[in-house]
Amino acid sequence: MERKVIIAGNWKMNKTAAAGKELVEALKPLVADVTEAEIVVCPPFTTLNAVVAAAAGSNIKVGAQNVHWAENGAFTGEISAEMLVTSGVEYVIIGHSERRQYFGETDATVNARMKAALKAGLKVIVCVGETLEEREGNKTSEVIGRQIKEGFEGIAAADMANVIVAYEPVWAIGTGKTATPEMAEETHKFIRETVSAIFGGDVAGALRIQYGGSMKPENARELVAQADIDGGLIGGAALKADSFAKLITEAIGR
Ligand code: PGA
């Protein structure tokens, strides 16, 4: 099955509105002729408006890094799906390992956020991945299987068309340690099988699964060439227009 490559930049807590606009303005001409991949940038909340404006009319889409599950109410510091949609945002990252590690994110809150985001019409990038301890304890499949089963509980098969999974081994994020393409492929295949067992082969075959964790121009081509790797979720290498653009062209095999 043909799956369109999707490369998303996760800016994390970097880039003011002015710096975000500057990055997108620099990126636009570098990727203007890219039709083989979907390109997404995910700035912090306060930078979203500037980036939506800068990306308007280009092939660069905009995503947020989190979303609350309630429609509105007394949730100080939180942002609703409607707030994102009405700001021109199309994607949202859910369950990033940094949120799981530092902000109490669980499979249950991932599930609640997913449901709210999908209901509002957002496309979601759901992150899964094992820690070093879990990998060394041979628990990778168990952990990722649970993250998917519990995170995707009660999601309608029809909504899976708007779901992207990002496999990010926690030990590879920001560390310079990348999973080997073979190691990543093995886990991506497992993720697709797990999704197939829940939602069926058609949904699993169409599902795009990104790799994330120290992906850079130098390793993007080999990673995305794997059968079940359909793109990347990029941290560090997405913070500069030239490295992000280079990574995108490598990923599509140019
Ligand atoms: P990294 O981050 O590319 O800097 O390792 C990836 C991520 O956390 O999404």
Image: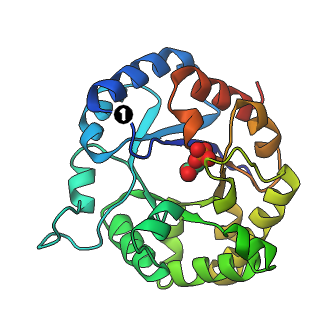
Compare residues 226 and 199 and report the one nearer the observer. 226
Residue 22 seen in the figure: yes
User: Residue 171 sits in which quadrant?
Assistant: bottom right
Q: Given the image, on which type of amino acid does mark 1 rest?
A: Lys
Residue ID at (88%, 55%): 182
Residue 152 in percent (x, y) is at: 52, 78
Residue ID at (58%, 29%): 244
Q: Quadrant of the C terminus?
A: top right
Residue ID at (64%, 56%): 208
Residue 195 in percent (x, y) is at: 66, 75
The residue carrying mark 1 is 15
Tell me if mark 1 has few (under 14), some (14-19) or many (20+) residues whose alpha carbon lies within 10 angstroms of its own: some
Is 215 above or below relative to 69?
above
Residue 223 in percent (x, y) is at: 78, 45
Q: Secondary structure at mark 1?
A: loop
Residue 252 in percent (x, y) is at: 72, 33
Is 48 above or below relative to 91?
above
User: Residue 35 sits in which quadrant?
Assistant: top right
Compare residues 234 and 204 and report the one nearer the observer. 234
